[in-house]
């Protein structure tokens, strides 16, 4: 018997527009900033105060770069295999011209770190202790400034020598070093709690084992309590020509200098200004998105998990809420909240939305990588008012098991969607972009697997959900990319989780996303 052949519908989701100064729209962040300026529409240039911490050389590298940010930085000439027109690259017009911000290198708050002390600290035999000492060298400079100076600093920039990346990551081997003896043995990786000796022996130093030995994550976690945004930069990013291998080539392969300038300037703007540099245009009113984050807590005796929610408003503003730690892991890759915590976390999100808009959201989309069980879903529904439609959406990356091909020199277009049914679709958020006349990627792009799991009200149209996700791929304010492959609700989940599981972040309250990236 012949079965009827099933045809799946392939559609195209148009590229979302972004909103810039004076209400102007454009699909490319760099073009929009160059032509119209940031969304806030600054009528005059604004100075920002920057604090810089680094070695003698690191301070010089950043000062030189800051001077360059004040002027025009062209893209490099095309190479032998490059197209004549490389639309994915853009000249950098200058910090003031694109962002309306002025940075004055002569007015930087500069705090110098001794390279010898940093070298000694990172050679401490216990890696947890080595990373803590290295972080202390930097953060002590901020503490000194806060205690003794009245001058406000908008953002602290950490300039990091390569030894930080060679020795202060959790997977760093640190082979061949002349180690320095510290307070802990080389093999100790978790705290030795002795309850019977509490109050008799000081065990406070053992808290270094509550943090993963990773410099970047420790800095972000500890600064949550300082209330300072930060930007971490490698010396090799700022001065690649100063770090070459035996063959005379830079030891790291970097983006062109104009792209580095765009990304650095975007990060400085986002982390120092009350509003992001651009927002998604034509947003549906009353819509809120949250991404749930689950992360195993290192060395936790009860195997507890940290949970948080990243809230993204339809304009692009973002806030992170921390929930209580608990036994939320139910399988190898499955995490589910208990009813009280699920209700409490959603209530925090809704309260913040109401404080900002004066009303509850019409639609609350919950994005996650896995399914939500009945206990979680009932609690989500109980926390939300009757007028709010809660929609659970699973967004899952695929790893090559699904491919779609097209005729031509380039792969499937970004925005292509293969509709499976009224709830499910494959969405290609990376692929060929006609606007850029190229595909930026190493291989045939993989789609995202999108599924609408549940809804308390009317089930949203799958094309509307896909269009929202496309918009959320364009609000990564830590760079100035045309788009990302993942929506921001999922993209930064790992970064937020990596910070929140640190012991140093234990009592951190809700914070804007800018403090985590």
Image: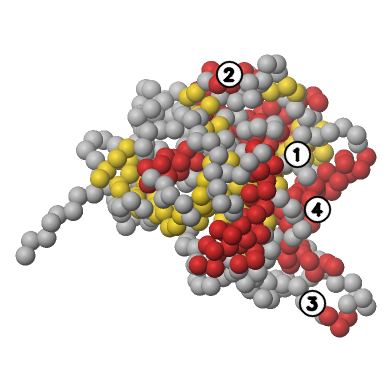
Mark 4 or mark 2, which is nearer the start of the sequence? 2
Residue under the image location 87 percent in, 32 percent down = 151
Q: Secondary structure at mark 4?
A: helix
Where is residue 476? Give x, y as percent: 55, 39
Write down the residue under mark 3.
193
Write down the residue under mark 4.
136
Residue under the image location 75 percent in, 23 percent down = 47
Quadrant of res 147? top right
Is 282 or 241 nearer to us in this picture? 282
Write down the residue under mark 2.
22
Evaluate if marks 2 and 4 touch, with contact meaning CB atoms under 8 Å apart. Answer: no
Is 272 or 42 nearer to us in this picture? 42
Where is residue 445? Give x, y as percent: 35, 46
Where is residue 421? Give x, y as percent: 30, 52
Q: Secondary structure at mark 2?
A: helix
Is 106 or 46 nearer to us in this picture? 46
Residue lying furthest bottom in this view?
Answer: 196
Q: Nearer the viewer, mark 4 or mark 3?
A: 3
Mark 3 or mark 1, which is nearer the start of the sequence? 1
Alpha carbon separation for disc pair 2 and 4:
44 Å
Quadrant for the N terminus, please. Answer: bottom left
């Amino acid at each position: 018997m012949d079965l009827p052949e099933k045809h799946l519908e392939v559609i195209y989701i148009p590229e979302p527009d972004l909103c810039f100064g004076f209400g102007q729209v454009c699909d490319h962040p760099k073009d929009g900033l160059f032509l119209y300026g940031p969304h806030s529409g600054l009528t005059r240039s604004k100075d920002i105060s920057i604090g810089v911490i680094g070695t003698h050389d690191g301070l010089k590298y950043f000062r030189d770069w800051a001077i360059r940010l004040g002027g025009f930085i062209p893209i490099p000439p095309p190479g032998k295999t490059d197209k004549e027109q490389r639309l994915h690259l853009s000249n950098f017009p200058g910090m003031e011209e694109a962002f309306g911000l002025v940075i004055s290198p002569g007015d930087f708050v500069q705090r110098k770190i001794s390279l010898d002390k940093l070298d000694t600290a990172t050679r401490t035999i216990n890696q947890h202790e080595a990373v803590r000492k290295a972080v202390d060298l930097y953060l002590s400079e901020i503490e000194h400034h806060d205690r003794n100076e009245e001058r406000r600093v908008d953002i602290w920039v950490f300039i990091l020598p390569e030894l930080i990346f060679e020795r202060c990551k959790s997977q760093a081997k640190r082979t061949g070093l002349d180690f320095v003896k510290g307070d802990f043995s080389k093999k100790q990786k978790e705290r030795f709690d002795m309850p019977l000796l509490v109050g008799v022996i000081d065990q406070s130093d053992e808290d270094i084992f509550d943090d993963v030995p990773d410099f970047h994550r420790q800095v972000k976690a500890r600064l949550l309590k300082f209330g300072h945004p930060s930007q971490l930069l490698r010396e090799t990013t700022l001065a690649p020509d100063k770090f070459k291998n035996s063959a005379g080539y830079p030891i790291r392969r970097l983006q062109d200098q104009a792209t580095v300038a765009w990304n650095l300037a975007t990060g400085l703007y986002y982390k120092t200004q009350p509003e992001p540099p651009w927002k998604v245009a034509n947003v549906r009113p009353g819509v809120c998105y949250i991404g749930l984050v689950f992360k195993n807590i290192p060395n936790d005796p009860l195997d507890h998990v940290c949970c948080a929610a990243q809230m993204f408003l339809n304009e692009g503003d973002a806030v992170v809420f921390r929930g209580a730690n608990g036994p939320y892991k139910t399988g190898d890759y499955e995490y589910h909240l208990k009813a009280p915590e699920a209700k409490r976390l959603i209530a925090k999100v809704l309260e913040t939305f109401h404080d900002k808009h004066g009303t509850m959201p019409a639609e609350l989309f919950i994005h996650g990588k896995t399914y939500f069980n009945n206990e979680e879903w009932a609690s989500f529904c109980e926390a939300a008012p009757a007028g709010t439609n809660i929609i659970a959406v699973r967004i899952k990356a695929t790893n090559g098991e699904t491919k779609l091909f097209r005729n031509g020199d380039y792969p499937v277009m970004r925005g292509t969607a293969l509709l499976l049914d009224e709830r499910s679709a494959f969405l290609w958020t990376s692929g060929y972009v006609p606007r850029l006349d190229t595909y930026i990627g190493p291989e045939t792009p993989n789609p995202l697997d999108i599924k609408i799991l549940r809804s308390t009200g009317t089930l949203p149209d799958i094309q509307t959900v896909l269009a929202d996700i496309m918009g959320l791929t364009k609000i990564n304010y830590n760079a100035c990319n045309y788009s990302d492959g993942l929506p921001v609700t999922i993209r930064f989940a790992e970064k937020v989780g990596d910070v929140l599981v640190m012991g140093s972040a234990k009592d951190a309250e809700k914070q804007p996303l800018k403090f985590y990236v």
